Structure formats: C-alpha cells, structure tokens
Amino acid sequence: MTTINTPPLTALPPPIEYTYQTGLTLSKLEAIRADLSERLTTITTPFEIATESGRLAGVLYALGEAAGALAAVETALRAAEAAKETALGGYLACVGGAAACFQGQYQRGANYFEEAEQAFAASGDSIGEAFRRQAYAREYASDLRQFSKTTEYLTVAVQVLRGRVPQTVIIENLLTQAACMVHQNELRRTREIIQQAEALMNEQKAHWFRPELAVIKADIAVLEGNTEDALKHCYTGLGGIGDSGDLRMLSPLYLLLGIILEREKNRESDVQDALDRAIATGRVRARRLHLALALRQMGMHMRRLTARNTVRAKGSGFLFEAERMLGEIQLSEQFPTAPAAPLPQIL
C-alpha cells in the first residue's frame, strides 16, 4: 500500500487566514479591517474582490460583527463565482454559515454549509471539507444541542486537519469537543481534551481562546458543586477579555457568573449586575442565542427570587423577550423559558 504524505498547509485561504493567526488580538484585527476596507476601494478584478472581501468577512466575524461579515461574504461569493474559484467559494460559505448562525439564522447557516460541502466536493479539497465539518459542528450543530453529531464531526475533522493547518484551528476543535463533553457529563474526557487544548494554547500563545476555556472550566466546577472554583474561572475568563481575548465571550461569561452567584446567599446585587452585563454585552457583540439565554435567566431570576409585583412583572417582560427571540431563531424546544432546573452549561 502506498502512503501519501500531504505536506503541512503553510497558508490558510483568505476568508480565515487572519482569524487563525498566532497572537491574534483585537487591535490587529481592527488594523487589518481598516487596511482591507481601504484596499477594497481600489481593486477591480473578481479574484481580488473575492479574496479581499473574504478576508474582511473573516475579520468582521471574529470581531462579532456578523451582519457586516454576511454582507462581505455575499460580495466575495459573487466575485469568486465570476473568477471560477470553487474552493475559495467553499471557505467563503463556511464563514457565511458561521456568521448566520451567530445571528440565529440557522436555516441560512445550514444553506451556506451545504453550499460549502458542494464546493469542496467539486474541487476535491479534503482539508476544506474537514474545515467545513468543524465549522458546521461548532456553529450549527452544537447550538441545536446535537451533541453526538457535533462530536462525530469534530473527531473526523481533527484527524484530517491535525498537522495540516495552524494549531489554532485544532484548539478551536478541541474546545468545541470539550464543551460537548460537558453537556454529556463526560467530565473525565472533558478534562483530557481541555488539557490538550490548554497545552497548545500555551505553546502557541493563543490567548484569544482563554475566555472560552474559562467557560468550560467553570461549567465543570458547577457540575461538581465547586462554586468557589466556578467563580474563579469566570473571573479569570472576564479578566482575560481585552485586546488579546475574544470579546464575544463577555455575554456567556457574565451569564454563567450570574447563574453561579444565585447559588450563594446575600449576592442579589451581584447577580443582578452580572445578568445586566450579560444582556448589555449580548445586545452589542454576542451570539443571538447567548443574548436570548441572558434574557431568559434574568426573567427567571426576577420571577423566582422576589415577591414584589413590579419586579416580577419586569421579569415577565424579560421572559417574554427571551421566548420571542428563541422562537425567532427556532430554538424554543431546546431552551424552554421556564425549565425546572436551568442548566449551567453555556457554550
């Protein structure tokens, strides 16, 4: 049997190359966005428009600006089709799928991922197809609580991607696997995976992912009844958000902090503050699902922990908004607005 050795991938395609660079920071992304926006005013060929608009789409998504990312993706896809860049179109569609799911447009996201699958099949791009599987699992299947499918897709994808793409892609895969394992209460396996992810993060100085790692560690501590450690991980995650930490994690971290603080006595003002921040940051730069969950938690908190009619009425308003939002993104069944025991897991 002949063994085919595929050389390591030295450069990712334009839609994702900047967002998986080592040492990713917000200031770098903002500088890249400014450069790309200026460059897009001068280029004219379909290939240039496809690549530069694709780069801009990836950067905007990393910044949590999903609407802008989708607009850039559509521009890039039209140009890629004109330039007959099939494989590039597949990666562009992956970014489109991620941005659509971020906005809670899951059917639109599924359509993008199907488009990407067709593009990679036509171009014979096995790495692209593995990346599509990872993006589909992380952005679509996990939000729909399809944890078995998510784990299956990620496991298959990482076998193809490892050694062929930057380690930051593998870190993202491992963190998503770990989040799925938490939801399935496979805590031993979760620890094994996050140890791998954390080792790579330290090696690559990939601080961008530390807030996401903190959410997973806090979830584990909550499930084990260790409130002190859970709070420590939340505060560590929030402290890691800034120039080198993913701002999209603010809302889920504040939400989890509020859920944990509810378990302690005499922390009412702290709970309120955490949930207020979860909602405020969720309205600016977060997954629509995370905002809906923050609204749901605030509503349940107000309804459950006070007898004052005015506060309970305000809580009902939050629950109504959460229910409406969850209905719009078609996740009402996965996230009922009045569960018997709200789950701590956020991601």
Image: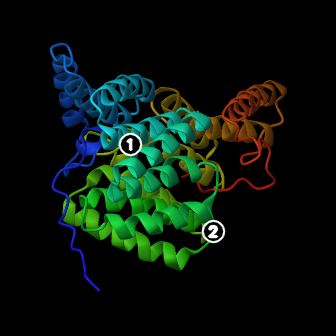
- Answer yes or no: is residue 272 visible: no
Secondary element at image label 1: helix
186 to 295, vertically: above or below: below
Q: Which mark is residue 184?
A: 2
> Which residue shows up at 55% across the image and 74% down it?
187
Q: Residues within 10 Å of mark 1 (few under 14, many from 20)?
A: many
- Mark 2 belongs to which amino acid? Gln
- Please state the total of marks drawn on the protein image: 2
**Residue 208 vs residue 226: left or right?**
left
Residue extending farthest bottom:
1
Tell me which label, 1 or 2, sits earlier in the chain. Answer: 1
**Residue 71 vs residue 342: left or right?**
left
**Mark 1 or mark 2: which is in front?**
1
> Which residue shows up at 60% across the image and 54% down it?
260
Locate residue 312: give its quadrant. Answer: top right
Q: Position of residue 119 (x, y in %)?
A: 41, 44
Q: Position of residue 297 (x, y in %)?
A: 67, 41
- Mark 1 belongs to which amino acid? Gly
> Which residue shows up at 59% across the image and 62% down it?
149
Of the pair 131 and 29, the residue shown nearer to us: 131
Locate residue 294: give its quadrant. Answer: top right
81 to 123, vertically: above or below: above
Pointer 1 with pointer 2, Cβ within 8 A: no
Residue extending farthest top:
41
Q: Position of residue 18 (x, y in %)?
A: 23, 41
Q: Position of residue 302 (x, y in %)?
A: 74, 36
Mark 1 → mark 2, Cα distance in angstroms: 31 Å
53 to 181, vertically: above or below: above
Q: Which mark is residue 90?
A: 1
